[in-house]
Image (spheres, rainbow, N blue to C red):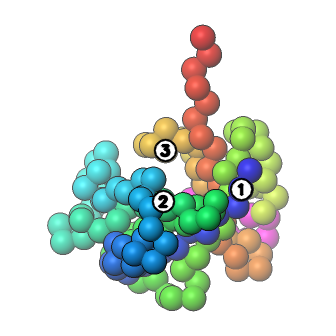
Amino acid sequence: MPLNVYLNFNGNCREVFDFYRSVFGGEFSMHLTFHELPEDMGMAEEEMNQILHVSYDIGGTTLMGSDVPSAFGPPVTIGNNMSISYLTETREQTEEYFKKISEGGTVTMPLDDQFWGDYFGACTDKFGINWMFNCASEPPSS
């Protein structure tokens, strides 16, 4: 499975990704705002149009990004606003890799089922590198 880059921004994610699209062409494969969250997350109304998640394919690699609203923590510091995103194949693989990579580091979001249907968690490894693990929900058996 591929490793992808995930970028975080302080409210200008839309501008950044629109710029990248103007350079490389193509379309976003996913583009969601915070208005599309399933419930109120305590966010300021003026931040609801910011980007929750955007995915953009460039030359066979997926560049992803989001804004980090004030309700989610301190502002992003440019330079450490990147994560490696690993798309795993099974829940078991996700749990194995997540446990190993987070050992000695910090779990920032424990593995859990998410509103978009996938199994997801995030951590910072013992070297200060941010990781996100996402296992797509398995199709129902017939």
Q: Which residues are magenta?
A: 102-110
Question: Which residue is pictured at 51% across the width and 88% down the height?
Answer: 78
Residue beneath disc 2 = 55
Q: Position of residue 120 (x, y in %)?
A: 58, 50
Q: Who comes first in sequence, dot 2 or dot 1? A: 1
Query: In the picture provided, is 32 more to the left or to the right than 129?
Result: left
Q: Tell me the amino acid under the disc marked 3.
A: Gln
Q: Residues within 10 Å of mark 2 (few under 14, many from 20)?
A: some
Secondary structure at badge 3 equals: loop
Residue beneath disc 1 = 2
Q: Tell me the amino acid under the disc marked 1.
A: Pro
Q: Mark 3 and mark 2: span between their CA atoms?
A: 17 Å
Q: Is residue 47 above or below residue 139?
A: below
Is any atom of residue 73 visible in this view? no
In reply to whether residue 49 is colored magenta, the answer given is: no
Q: Position of residue 2 (x, y in %)?
A: 71, 56
Asked whether 31 or 69 is in front, the reply is: 31
Is any atom of residue 114 visible in this view? yes
Q: Who comes first in sequence, dot 1 or dot 3? A: 1
Q: Residues within 10 Å of mark 3 (few under 14, many from 20)?
A: few
Q: Name which quarter of the figure residue 33 lies in.
A: bottom left
Q: Mark 1 and mark 3: span between their CA atoms?
A: 21 Å
Secondary structure at badge 1 equals: loop
* For discs 1 and 3, the disc positioned in front in the rendered view: 1
